[in-house]
Image (cartoon, grey):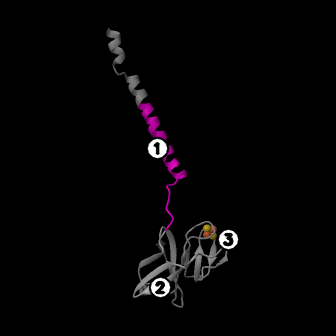
Amino acid sequence: MAEETLDREPTRRGFINWFLGTSAVAFLLSVFYPVGRYLIPPPVAESTAGTVTLPLKAEDVKPNTGQIFKFGNRPAILVRTTAGELRAFSAVCTHLNCTVQYRPDLGHIWCACHNGHFDLNGKNIAGPPPRPLDPYVVNVRGRQIVVSKSA
Ligand code: FES
């Protein structure tokens, strides 16, 4: 009768085994959960935005500058040429999808990932990009800049 009671009492060894077991499971979860989330990214819906009104005033965009903005869920770039014309393109490089940027020193669009160059018509002019950037239509309504997909 006394032995039976002793078997049911928690022992130090039992506690340590339980503690190490749960610690090992927690450690494995903390390692494999982020890896699993990385390998299986959540589904991202394709952008349905056809028009975006930028939070910029037209007069605030200086010549020979470029700015990245969100067009739906993808980056786009707005450029004001040295002649003062506003142009917009997808900012997703056509090589391996890096985000391009405007280089005032070069006067055109540049991709830092592999030194890709695009002119101010979005045409690939140097480096590995295989095709031009997708162009967007820019309209200025009052002081607002409205960018839309080309028809
Ligand atoms: S991703 Fe732009 S040049 Fe390679």
| Element under disc 2 | strand
Amino acid beneath label 3: Pro
Q: Which residues are magenta?
A: 19-47
In three-dimensional space, the C-alpha distance between marks 2 and 3, rounded to whole angstroms, equals 31 Å
Q: Is mark 2 within 8 Å of ligand 1?
A: no
Q: Residues within 10 Å of mark 2 (few under 14, many from 20)?
A: some
Q: Nearer the viewer, residue 141 or 4?
A: 141
Q: Examine the image and state in which quarter residue 142 appears.
A: bottom left
Q: Is residue 112 above or below residue 78?
A: above
Location of mark 3 (residue):
128
Location of mark 1 (residue):
30
Q: Given contact means CB atoms under 8 Å apart, are the residues at marks 2 and 1 in contact?
A: no
Q: Residues within 10 Å of mark 3 (few under 14, many from 20)?
A: some
Q: Indicate yes or no whether the magenta region holds residue 45.
A: yes
Amino acid beneath label 2: Asn
Q: Residue at x 63, y 68 (%)?
A: 95
Query: In the shown orientation, is residue 10 left or right of residue 120?
Result: left
Amino acid beneath label 1: Ser
Identify the disc placed on residue 59. none
Question: Which of the image's four quarters has the N terminus?
Answer: top left
The location of residue 52, given as percent across then percent down, is 45, 76
Q: Which corner quadrant of the figure contains ligand 1? A: bottom right
Identify the disc placed on residue 139. 2
The location of residue 108, given as percent across then percent down, is 59, 81
| Element under disc 1 | helix
The location of residue 137, given as percent across then percent down, is 52, 82
In three-dimensional space, the C-alpha distance between marks 3 and 1, rounded to whole angstroms, equals 39 Å
Q: Nearer the viewer, residue 15 or 96?
A: 96
